[in-house]
Image: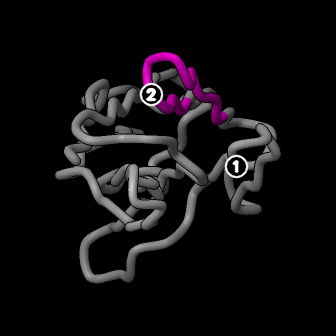
């Protein structure tokens, strides 16, 4: 299974970006999908996640500004980021819990995409 992210880049404070992450490979179903971020010298933290039933969870620092969504037909998760702040600057990683045809669930990570917000 591979997760491929796209949509990162450089944006001014107050701007918007939309991240996408598409899963491919041997997939029976995908449970929770999420976005994490890691700034230089800091640990990787949860930004948002969405479960298979579409319930969502957000970090307090992004609540009201970011929206996570998924398209199950495309095995894709999105992160709409509005009102971006310089402190949102980080490498953003996609994560997915993928179930295979043997009913085994594994966690997979994308390669990361850089988001830089200038002040």
**The quadrant where residue 10 appears:** top left
Give coordinates of residue 65: x percent, y percent: 71, 36
> Is 72 inside the magenta-drawn segment?
yes
Q: Is residue 1 left or right of residue 29?
A: left
* 73 or 96: nearer the viewer: 73
Name the residue rendered at 33%, 67% in the picture. 39
Q: Is residue 48 above or below residue 45?
A: above
Q: Main secondary structure of the magenta part?
A: strand
Q: Which residue is mark 2?
A: 76
Q: What are the residue bounds of the magenta stretch?
A: 68-79
Q: Is residue 52 above or below residue 40?
A: above
Q: Which residue is mark 1?
A: 51
Name the residue rendered at 61%, 27% in the picture. 82
Name the residue rendered at 70%, 61% in the picture. 59
Give coordinates of residue 57: x percent, y percent: 76, 55
Crowd tier of the residue under label 1, counting other residues whose Cα lies within 10 Å: few below 14, some 14–19, many 20 or above: some
> Is 54 inside the magenta-drawn segment?
no
């Amino acid at each position: 299974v591979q997760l491929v992210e796209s949509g990162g880049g450089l944006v001014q404070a107050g701007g918007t970006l939309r991240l996408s992450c598409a899963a491919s490979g041997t997939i029976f179903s995908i449970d929770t999908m999420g976005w994490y971020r890691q700034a230089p010298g800091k640990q990787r933290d949860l930004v948002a996640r969405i479960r298979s039933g579409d319930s969502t969870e957000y970090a307090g620092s992004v609540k009201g500004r970011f929206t996570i969504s998924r398209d199950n037909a495309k095995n894709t998760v999105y992160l709409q980021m509005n009102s971006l702040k310089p402190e949102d600057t980080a490498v953003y990683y996609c994560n997915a819990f993928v179930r295979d045809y043997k009913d085994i669930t594994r966690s997979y990570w994308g390669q990361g995409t850089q988001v830089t917000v200038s002040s």
